[in-house]
Image (cartoon, rainbow, N blue to C red):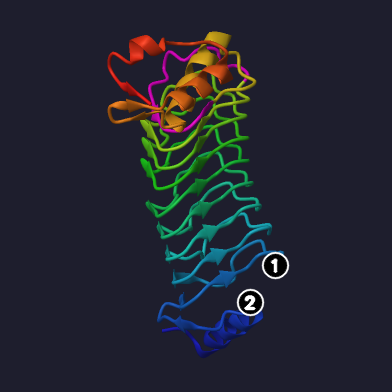
Amino acid sequence: MILYESFNEIHSICREYEIDDYTINSDGSIDVDGDVNLDYKKITKLQLNFNKVKGNFECNNNQLTTLEGGPKEVDGYFSCLSNKLTSLKGGPKSVGGYYDCNANRLTSLEFIADEIGESLFCAKNNLTTLKGCPEKINGAFHTHYSMLTSLEYGPKLVEGDFVCSSNYLTTLKGCPENIDGEFDCSGNLNLSDLKDFDSEFSGLFLCMNTNLNFLDKQEYGCISMFRRLNIIDGDTIDKKRLMYLHSIFHFKFFKIDDVSKIYDVI
């Protein structure tokens, strides 16, 4: 049972941070029936112990070095971007929306939520490994502008864009098996071959500012654009879209006469 003085202190802090609809639990934690917005509060730690938050939880643009006291469950999105976090310990285990920990000092994704309902944004950190990352991302996955040399321990399935640009990758080994969006590995200056790249993706393949040879870039760029344009529909090929693809890459990778033997060209 919490002390009367502690009870009053919790009420005082909630009033200060405009948290109105809440319940104080017997252990001193609080459940919030709505959003919590602690952005730009100049705090170095969370001054309340949160349990469940039925809305969104934001604590962006502070000087937080720890998430201790953070909610265990967030029904909406969870965002702690632009702090000084070196670990996600103390953060939620379940997030219904997206999880945004961009622009911190993280070196791994250990202690991240076990369940994330939407996208995961962990760019602009000091990540040297993706260890701790969920195997499935129900949206986009952004991990650009970090210090990754490998994609091992990363997600196996990404239901949105996968962005790993501007890291220090020398190989694409460990990349997701399936990506339902764009694959962007641009700006990895030491990336020189695609021998470990074996992903299924539905959007563009972006690889600018890498040491991949020109033919590799052309091949994967052409394949990704082919998918994006939906040129094939069952047994039919859209000739206008196919010719548009040819015009972009300035070469014809197969002949219309050969295609018409297998598909109806309209």
How would you rate the neighbour count of disc 1 (Cα within 10 Å): few for under 14, some for 14-19, many for 20 or more?
Answer: few
**Which quadrant holds the N terminus?**
bottom left
Front in this rendered view, residue 85 or 245: 245
* Callout 2 amino acid: Tyr
Label at residue 17: 2
Tell me where residue 177 appears, x and y as whole percent: 36, 30
Magenta region, main secondary structure: loop
Label 1 secondary element? loop
Label at residue 173: none
Q: Answer whether residue 213 is visible to the viewer in this image.
A: no
Front in this rendered view, residue 260 or 127: 260
* Callout 1 amino acid: Lys
Tell me where residue 264 appears, x and y as whole percent: 31, 23
Residue 19 falls in which quadrant of the image?
bottom right
| 188, above or below 124, in the image | above
Front in this rendered view, residue 132 or 134: 134
Label 2 secondary element? loop
Q: Contact, CB < 8 Å: mark 2 with mark 1? A: yes
**Comes first in the chain, label 2 or label 1:** 2
Q: Answer whether residue 132 is visible to the viewer in this image.
A: yes
Tell me where residue 56 appears, x and y as whole percent: 51, 66
Residue at 46% x, 82% y: name it: 24
> In screen coordinates, is 138 left or right of 19?
left
How would you rate the neighbour count of disc 2 (Cα within 10 Å): few for under 14, some for 14-19, many for 20 or more?
Answer: few
Residue at 62% x, 22% y: name it: 208
Q: Is residue 202 magenta?
A: yes
| 35, above or below 240, in the image | below
Residue at 53% x, 10% y: name it: 251
Residue to which mark 1 is pinned = 41
The stretch in magenta equals 189-205
Q: CA distance from mark 2 to mark 1?
A: 9 Å
